[in-house]
Amino acid sequence: MIYLVKKCPECGSERIRVDHSKGEAVCLDCGLIVSEDEMFDTGKEWRNFDQGDGEDSTRSGSPMKYVKLNKGLVTMIDRRGTDLRGNKLSSKGRAQMYRLIKWHKRASVSSSMQRNLSIALTEMRRVASYLNIPDTLVEAAALLYRRTVKKGLIRGRLIEAVVASVLYTVCRTYHVPRTLNEMAEASGLTKKEIGRTYRFLVRELNLEVPLTNPIHYIPRFASELNLSGEVQEEGRKILEEAIKKGLISGRGPTGVAAAAVYIAGLLKGERRTQKEVANVAGVTEVTIRNRYRELKKRLNIDVAA
């Protein structure tokens, strides 16, 4: 319990006794009831009656999740086909239970918005799993998608395109390197379609999406190429110097990052071919060759290809 008043307003005494059963705070010197409504319980909302298992018998429920259709705040009917005691239901009871489950699902997606969210959130989880996007970012993407639906921006556009665009936006915002090419591959759409939808959402929702920093791609490319930490550090230094001199302006971040990894591998004696680096970065060998020549010339890097 926390009691806000520390002194008795009548006599100034600090000898205050809190009666939890009555919810009162009484001054022990003058007997004044100091307060009856300024006591707050900051403890848990639940009680634990069994200390043997070491776990609290919580009743506060699971957290709200935007990636679930009803935000996780809904009761689901169990499909195990057993009663409360764990005994199997009869064939008639199971058939009745399955009918209840079917109608329960139909009732939960009764409106067009609910049907849209049902399809979109399922697609979002699939694409996020394919691209190994963290759960926290998927939650942020689900919240942004709900905002998009609420504003009516989904009308006339493919659900898959909006889902991919939202995920791409969140990844860029939180500096998780995922390219448009990867989004296109995961969603089965073209890079052009996703890019057009992404620009539309950014404009209509007034989103402030930071520019992609090519340094964020270095650890990922190096890891997929089985390169050491020294190569990663060298690639980061190359890109930092290139950014200071303004060499990446107008260049694709993945191409510049791939060239930096290629150069760093050569400098540290962990050579990878341009084709190997291009396959990992999702760019062409010509792009890596051009960025390699630019970085080598402008940064005065002494390395033999």
Image (cartoon, helix red, strand yellow):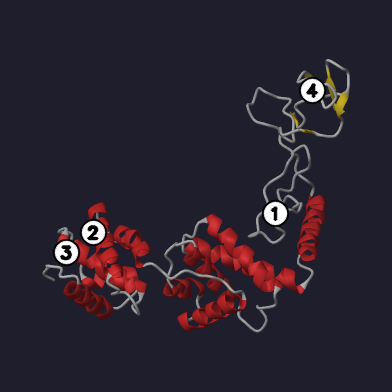
Query: The disc labelled 2 sits on which kind of residue?
Result: Glu
Mark toward the start of the polypeptide (3 vs 2): 2
Q: CA distance from mark 1 to mark 4?
A: 51 Å
Q: Nearer the viewer, residue 268 or 284?
A: 268
Residue with the mark numbered 3: 266
Q: CA distance from mark 1 to mark 2?
A: 46 Å
Quarter holding the N terminus is top right
Name the residue located 77 percent from the left edge and 63 percent from the top edge.
Answer: 108
| Residue found farthest to the top | 29
Query: The disc labelled 1 sits on which kind of residue?
Result: Gly
Q: Examine the rendered structure and indicate whether residue 275 appears above or below residue 237.
A: below
Q: CA distance from mark 3 to mark 2?
A: 10 Å
Q: Nearer the viewer, residue 140 or 182?
A: 140
Task: Classify residue 270 as left or right of residue 1.
Answer: left
Residue with the mark numbered 4: 12
Q: Residues within 10 Å of mark 3 (few under 14, many from 20)?
A: some
Q: Nearer the viewer, mark 2 or mark 4?
A: 4
